[in-house]
Every structure is written in C-alpha cells, then in structure tokens.
Amino acid sequence: MILIEVILFLSIALLGGVLGRLARIPIGSVIGAMLLVGIIQVSEIFSFTNMGWLTFVVQVLIGIMLGVSFLSVNKSVIKRISVGLIISLIGIILMIILIGSIISVSSSLDFKLAILSSAPGAVVEMATIATALDLDSPTVVLIHLFRVVIIMAIFPILIKSLNRVISEGARNKK
C-alpha cells in the first residue's frame, strides 16, 4: 500500500512540476509540484502521510545539488570575494534579525519561524530547514513564495530602469 502511495504522490508532484514549468512561473517546477500536491491534500482527494525517509532523500539530493555547484570554486575565487562575502554576511544576518523581529512582534509568528521566513534563500532549502527544525514549513514556503514572486515581478523592471539611467548617463558624458 505504501508503494502505491509513494508512486501516486510522486506522479502528482511530477505533473505539478511539469505544469509549473510549462506555465513559466518563477521556480515553476517547485511551485507547481507544491501547489498540486497541496490542492490534492487540502481537497482530501488523496491523503498523503509524511514520509520521513522521503524528507531524508530530498535533503540528500539538495546537498548533492549544492555540492556539485562548488566544482568551479577554488581558493583564488574565495580569496577574491572574501571581504565582500564577510560584509554581505554581516549585513544579511543583521537584516534577518531586524526583519524577523519586526515580523514576530507585528504578527502571531514565533520568533524562530519569523527569522527563517525572513532569511534569504531558496524556497526548497528554507522549507527543508523548517521541517528539520520542526517549524511550520508551509508558512515559511508561503512567505518565501510571496518574496520570490515580488522579486521576479519587480527586478526585471528595476534592472531595465537602471540600465536606461546608466546608458543615458554614459551618453550625456560624451
């Protein structure tokens, strides 16, 4: 019975991922899979149980994916970016604490949940961390999805505007 549930779960998630990617929404594979599985779960068409072993497999796969991305990093790259990295890290930590505190004080969210929800990071990785810390991962996912959608909507406009200003500034200097 559990094998049928796993196959059904993975099939629905795969279908959602494909639909999300075809819709060309930001991180469509993740959002599509999550939404379709969530809709099926909430509508009680099927009821999927939390499979701890599957969470482990997903965490290992994320670790592999991130580890492979380090192949092009060497010591000279790390030395070149170290000062900027330290400054960025300190700034990000301070912003996370500030924004997490504001969210926690102004809402009913637990401080740990507010901190994780305000931390920059990929949706999947933040949801995995929330699950590992026994926090409300759907809340973390919703907050991060909102952030990603807003960033995907605003940044292209912002970058085009900045490019236009920079181009006009360069023309005016000539």
Image (cartoon, rainbow, N blue to C red):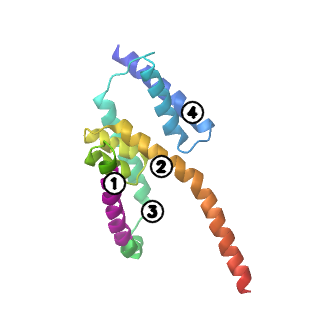
Residue 61: tell me if it is visible.
no
From mark 3 to mark 4, how far is it between C-alphas?
29 Å
Q: Which mark is residue 18?
A: 4
Q: Nearer the viewer, mark 3 or mark 2?
A: 2
Q: Nearer the viewer, mark 1 or mark 3?
A: 1
Which residue carries the number 3 mark?
A: 72
Name the amino acid, label 1: Ile
Crowdedness near tag 2: few (<14), some (14–19) or many (≥20) residues, C-alpha within 10 Å: some
Q: CA distance from mark 1 to mark 3?
A: 38 Å
- SS label for mark 3: helix
**Are the residues flagged by discs 1 and 4 in contact, CB closer than 8 Å?**
no
Seen at 71% across and 76% down, the residue is 168
Mark seen at residue 143: none
User: In which quadrant of the rendered image does the N terminus lie?
Assistant: top left
Q: Give the secondary structure at mark 2.
A: helix
Reading the image, the residue beneath label 1 is 102
Kindly identify the amino acid type of the residue bearing the numbered disc 3: Ser
Magenta-drawn stretch contains 93: yes
Q: Earlier in the sequence, mark 2 or mark 1?
A: 1
Outermost residue on the top side: it is 1
Measured from the top left, where is residue 26 in percent x and y? 55, 45
Label whose residue precedes the other's in the sequence (1 or 4) = 4
- From the image, tell me which residue sits under label 2: 147
Q: Secondary structure at mark 1?
A: helix
Image position of 172 with respect to 85: above or below: below
Q: CA distance from mark 2 to mark 4?
A: 22 Å
Q: Main secondary structure of the magenta part?
A: helix
The image position of residue 6, as x and y in percent, is 39, 22
Q: Which residues are magenta?
A: 85-103
Residue type indicated by callout 4:
Val
On whether residue 164 falls in the magenta region, the answer is no
Specify the farthest residue to the bottom.
174
